[in-house]
Amino acid sequence: MSSTESSTDPETGGGRGQLRGLKVVEFAHVVAGPLAGSMLADQGADVVHVEPPGTGDAARGMGPRKDGHPLWFKVAGRNKRSVTLDLHHEAGRELAHRLVAWADVVIVTLRAGRLRAWGLDWEAVHRINPKAVLLQISGFGATSSRADAPGFGKVGEARSGVVHLTGFPDSPPVHTGFSHGDAVTGLMGAYAVLAALHRRDHDPDFDGEWIDLALFEPLFRLVEWQVIVHDQLGSVPERSGNQLAVAPAAVINTYASRDGEWITVTSATLRSVRNIARLLGLDEDEFATVEQQHAGRERLDDALRAWVAERTTAECLDAFARTDVVASPVLSAADIAADPVYAEREDIVTVEDADLGAVRMQAVIPHFRQRPGHVWRTGPALGQDNHLVYREWLGLGEEELAALEDSDVV
């Protein structure tokens, strides 16, 4: 049911994808910054993940384990190079600057004061490598009064407006069940990097770029209507369960079937709502306009809830398909692993891992048909690529690297 991605020689790497030849170094740990790097690595970029010797990225210890091996980092660190480097040492900072000079893109998530002290802030990066694109991710942005305050994705979610809108009216606000703020920031960061690289490739006067991204800003941007609604109407959209505070059409909710499964039914057009009314045996003409549909919103919702509750999931989905009602069962991870559409899309791949053998994980998404990316390795061992990156890519001599190892810099 899933395609297999054969491992590639770790000395040569992926060598495939839209971003082959792009050089990235990330002084970034846990989720947001590394996810931005992952998006680039999946498409063939050479991404060097810098970690402290001995302990490594804290993400290496996150999440469930099998046979003592953490599973999350197998995905989070995939397609990257791991090098160790202690930035507390002056020699470590000098080597970090050599990585900056080598790279096209630099990703940082350290606090502003630490970046300045270690020479990884915009001014230093731009001086070392005037053509570099710097992606700086922080809790509150480099230009705010809280530039040096710590920040995590959940705080970003809370500040974005998303959590205020998520949950039921009579219940507390709800965070989504994964690192939502971090993940969306990683995606937005990768998009921003590619925008800057496009300008670099078309502007002969390109003088580097500094992307300054706060953890709350990507989700804030994606809730397109919240600011203008408050500005123009003076209202504050509130939680509305599995419906939407500002909905494109009258029917959007999740309903329990007779066999205890959940089905999401959604509408976005006048026609889609009329299809639902017809399925329920209601008079379509009573739902012909936007005003009529919104006036009858509760009636439609109550009728659909009762209709679904009387039928099995299979019966519901068959009837929905016959009447052009857009719906889907709510899938668990087990459902996804067995789902035929995921298999047809080749969205789950099998990759060989040094510790666990064959493991399944998400494929490279989005799919490119002409020059696709691929998963050529799971998350590497700590410092696995020290020799390759430092000796072959940066050109350090054998004695120089040995001295750095002896002094615990790498």
Image: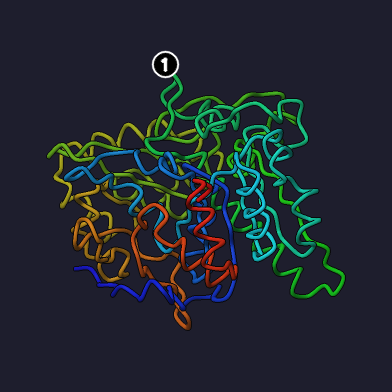
The residue beneath circle 1 is 170
Residue for point 64% across, 56% down: 106
Residue at image position (46%, 78%) is 16
Residue 368 x/y as whole percent? 46, 75
> Colour mode?
rainbow
Instruction: Work out whether residue 339 or residue 106 is closer to the camera in this orientation and state it.
Output: 106
Residue at x 53% of width, y 32% of height: 152
Q: Residue at x 56, y 73 (%)?
A: 19
User: What is the crowding at mark 1: few (fewer than 14 residues within 10 Å), some, or many (at least 20)?
Assistant: few
Q: Locate residue 242, reporting x and y percent.
A: 39, 34
Q: Judge whether 382 appears above or below 223 on screen.
A: below
Instruction: Report helix, strand or loop for mark 1.
Output: loop
Question: Could you say where residue 367 lies in the image, as x and y percent from the top left?
Answer: 43, 71
Which quadrant of the rendered structure holds the N terminus? bottom left
Horizontally, is 196 left or right of 401 in the view? right
Residue 269 visible, this angle: no
Residue 120 as seen in the image, left or right of residue 270? right
